[in-house]
Amino acid sequence: MARRTGSAKGNVRVEAGAGEGFWDRPALMNAAADLLLLVAAILLAWAGVLAVQRLPLLPLNQLVVAAPLEQVSPLQVEHTARSALAGNFLTVNLESAQAAFERMPWVRSASVRRLWPDGVELAIEEHRAVARWTPQDGEPRLVNTRGEVFAGTSGEALPAFAGPEGSAPRVLERYREFGERLAAVGRRPVAVQLSPREAWQVRLDDGVLLELGRDQPKHPLTERLDRFTTHFAAAGALARNRLHGIGTVDMRYPNGFALRASKTG
């Protein structure tokens, strides 16, 4: 609102609020000053962090491996540590270092923690291979004790597993179950295969192939395998007398089985 004042020389018009700009408002000036101080403090702290990272303070001088390793070599650990453990004791990124170690062959999981005053402790859980898995795109793969498939090679004599992707835990479970029952007749499985149609095949250590078929509530796989072990001796005698060796045992019949001679018999 404007007001008029009179004088001998005429009227003077004065606008309301004149003289109340930024410099005439203490509260606004104080808020701006606080904001500038806050920005300056943040920049100063950031500069301090960068300076600490560049100073030779608390350097990392040792990497301690918590337990002996069987599959991972010291050279592999050293090579990974050179790139993964960047910075000093305070600034090293433990999460990224853990991820780098877990990308190493045969490493199932890894944990990394600071070890006062100048070290890092590394704990690695290695895969324990129990079988070979069907190669995919030419990449050799193995199955560990948990039924997990991982990339790797091994010179051990391991059984061969095959099945649809994601079925390795089921195949491992069946392998163990089949092995327990076959041990009663002195045989062991050396290969277990699950087809896309859910049919099971088991290759024994003497070369015999067991066709078990699909698991069914009325005729479960365990029942068929028990039928084989019960008549194993008689089947072997028949094979020696007439077939000159068993090649395949078809256990998919409800109350019996069929024998086929081996190709080399």
Image (cartoon, helix red, strand yellow):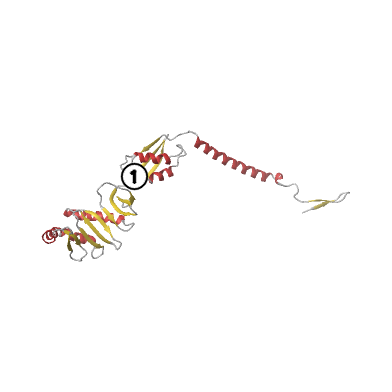
Nearer-the-camera pick, 262 or 91: 262
Q: Position of residue 260 (x, y in %)?
A: 17, 62
The secondary element bearing badge 1 is classed as strand
Direction right: furthest residue = 8
- Image quadrant in which you'd find residue 78: top left
* Residue at image point 80% right, 52% down: 3
Dot 1, how many residues are within 10 Å of its Cα: few (below 14), some (14-19), or many (20+)? some
- Image quadrant in which you'd find residue 223: bottom left
Q: Quadrant of the C terminus?
A: bottom left
Nearer-the-camera pick, 89 or 192: 192
* Residue at image point 57% right, 39% down: 44
* Residue at image point 71% right, 44% down: 23
Direction front: furthest residue = 264
Going by the image, does 70 lie left or right of 120? Answer: left
Residue 219 vertical position relative to residue 108 in the rendered view, above or below: below
Q: Quadrant of the N terminus?
A: bottom right
Going by the image, does 239 lie left or right of 221? Answer: left
Disc 1: which residue: 125
Q: Position of residue 5 (x, y in %)?
A: 83, 50
Q: Position of residue 83 (x, y in %)?
A: 43, 41
Direction left: furthest residue = 241
Residue 74 vertical position relative to residue 139 in the rendered view, above or below: above
Q: Position of residue 111 (x, y in %)?
A: 38, 43
Going by the image, does 227 lie left or right of 21? Answer: left
Amino acid marked by disc 1: Glu
* Residue at image point 42% right, 43% down: 97
